Image: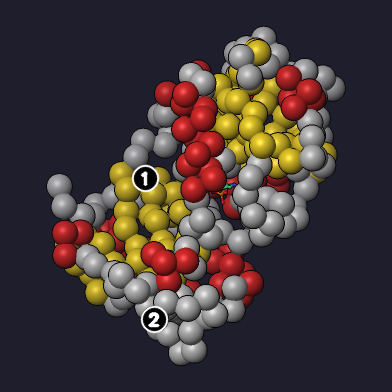
Amino acid sequence: MSRTVYVNRRYMPEEQATVSIFDRGFLFADAVYEVTSVVGGKMLDFTAHAKRLERSLGELDMAAPCTMDELEQIHRQLIERNELDEGLVYLQVTRGAADRDFAYPVGATPTLVLFTQAKSIIDSPTAQTGIKVISIPDIRWGRRDIKTVQLLAPSMGKMAAKAAGADDAWLVEDGFVTEGTSNNAYIVTADGTIVTRDLSNDILHGITRAAVLRFAAEAQMAIEERPFTIDEALNAKEAFFTSASAFVCPVVQMDGQAIGDGKVGPVAKRLREIYLEESLKTAT
Ligand code: PDD
């Protein structure tokens, strides 16, 4: 079925949607994006995604294509027009079309594209079984806190994982895990402490991460925000990851070795339940 998508102030069938070949998103990956999950036709944490988008735009001196209120309305329109019950809304802003030049063009009009993707996020098989990851070097650039569309390194990581018979890769820099290819990474230590890397330019400041840590703290769970090593992950009781497109998902194997007993652990399971319960309460 053809979707209705949004391109530069117009809703249209996906087959008719086009962007200029001179668009800097296409030529320079000069673009930022957001992925917001939808459950029961409602968005989870839209305001936090809009805030992070504003921050990404600001860090790159990129003009906002419209107000955040207008963005929210476009999200809603797309959910409605596509009768999206469960899935994702993808949004991308580029600096716009201009003659090819490394320097930012003056006065270019930003390109704004949004589309929906139907997906079962709640009843996901991987949440039931957990996933297998491999560890690989983090070859990405130094501003991973900006959510840009430079996603070739993560794509290469996913392909390396696939080739190794795993589902995803955890990225390692200077001996420490930064994050997953498209998610934030966590371990649970022998004493039950949830450990995840602290926020810096080294990782994306996940919206799901912020929510999960808030809910975990409210549930009196112990949390440490610090880098951890692959060795710590291999010896952990549990491991899991978070993202808007997967919520909380267990990791049961790394580099061919079982983590904990190799089964979905109680902390990841509980956090997934709490996350879903709490975020659905405030979904809009
Ligand atoms: N990925 N780290 C990276 C590198 C990511 O790409 C993502 C999100 C996250 C988790 O952030 P959040 O909880 O805000 O989704 C962490 C999205 C879902 C994607 O690229 O599809």
- In the visual, does 207 lie left or right of 34? right
Residue 71 image position (x, y, % from top left) = 41, 71
Front residue (pair 160, 221): 160
Q: State the residue at coordinates (71%, 52%).
A: 202
- In the visual, does 85 lie left or right of 68? left
Q: Is residue 202 visible to us here? A: yes
Front residue (pair 24, 226): 24
Q: State the residue at coordinates (64%, 29%).
A: 135
Real-space CA distance between mark 1 and mark 2, rounded to the nearest whole angstrom: 36 Å
Q: Give the quadrant of residue 54.
A: bottom right
Find residue 99 and name its label: 2
- Mark 1 vs mark 2, foreground winner is 2
Residue 31 image position (x, y, % from top left) = 48, 66
Say which amino acid is labelled 1: Gly
Name of the residue lying farthest toward the bottom: 107
- In the visual, does 107 lie left or right of 11? right
Disc 2 residue lies near ligand 1 with CB under 8 A: no
Front residue (pair 34, 83): 34
Q: Which residue is mark 1?
A: 87
Find residue 120 and name its label: none
Q: Is residue 212 visible to us here? A: no
Q: State the residue at coordinates (16%, 59%).
A: 15
Crowd rating for badge 2 (residues with CA inside 10 Å; few <14, some 14–19, many 20+): few
Q: How is the image coloured?
A: secondary structure
Q: Against 200, is 111 above or below?
A: below
Residue 102 image position (x, y, % from top left) = 52, 75
Name of the residue lying farthest toward the front: 101
Crowd rating for badge 1 (residues with CA inside 10 Å; few <14, some 14–19, many 20+): many
Residue 56 image position (x, y, % from top left) = 59, 67
Say which amino acid is labelled 2: Asp
